[in-house]
Image (cartoon, rainbow, N blue to C red):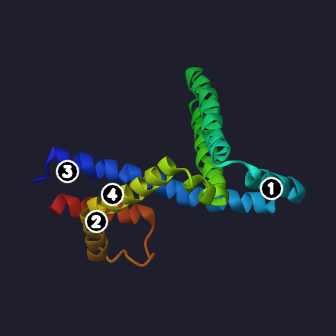
Amino acid sequence: MTSFKQVAWTALALIFLGVSWLWETFAPLVQAVIDVLPLRRLKALAHAALEKLSPYATLLVFLIPLALSEVIKIISFVAFARGQIFAGMVIYLLAEVVRFGLAAYVWAICREKLLSIEWVAKFHAWLLRLNDVAQRQIAPLRLWIRQALEEAGLLGGKAGLWARVKALWRHARRR
C-alpha cells in the first residue's frame, strides 16, 4: 500500500516534470516560428539589443513573457466569467505558450549572461537537482507503466493512446 506522502511527492514530481517538458518543447517551437518569420532585420536588432544589455537588464527582459502571460490570463478569466469556457481555455493555453515559449527563447539566447548572476546560477543548479530528484521519484511509476504496456503488447508505437490507457487500466485493476 502506498502512503499519501509518496503519492503527493510523485504528483509533485510529475507536475515539475510536466513544466520541464513544456519548457523543453516550446523553446524549439518558438525558435522555429521566429526562424520562419520574414523579419530578419527585426530579429537581428532584437538579438543585438539583447547582447548589449547587462545581466540584470537581461533578467528583466527574461521576465517580460511572464508578465505578458499574466495579462493574457486575465483575458481568459474574463472569458470564463462570461461563460465562454472554450474561448477561455484557448486563451489560457495561449498564455502558457507565450510564457514558456518566449522565456525559453530568451533563455536560449541569453543563458550565459543570466547565469553570470550568482543567485540565478544557484537557482538554475537547484532546479537541475530538483529535476534529477523528480526523475528518480517517478522511476517506479515509469517502470510500472512500461510493464503494463509490455504485458499488453503495446510498446513500440503500434497502439493508439486509447489502447494504452485501457491496458494501463486493466493492469491497475489486476493488482
Q: Which is closer to the viewer, label 4 or label 2?
A: 4
Q: Indicate left or right for 125 with 42 as reference.
A: left
The residue type indicated by label 4 comes to: Ala
Disc 1 or 2, which lies upstream in sequence?
1
The residue type indicated by label 3 comes to: Gln
Q: CA distance from mark 4 to mark 1?
A: 37 Å
Q: CA distance from mark 4 to mark 3?
A: 12 Å
Q: Secondary structure at mark 4?
A: helix
The residue at which mark 2 appears reads as 139
Disc 4 or 1, which lies upstream in sequence?
1
The residue type indicated by label 2 comes to: Ala
| Residue 134's disc number | 4
Disc 2 or 3, which lies upstream in sequence?
3
Q: Secondary structure at mark 2?
A: helix
Residue shown at 64%/62% (left/top)?
A: 28
Disc 4 or 2, which lies upstream in sequence?
4
Whether residue 8 is visible to the viewer of this picture, yes or no, is: yes
Residue 151, given in percent of the width and then of the height, sits at 26, 75
| Residue 99's disc number | none
Q: Secondary structure at mark 3?
A: helix
Residue 11, given in percent of the width and then of the height, sits at 30, 49
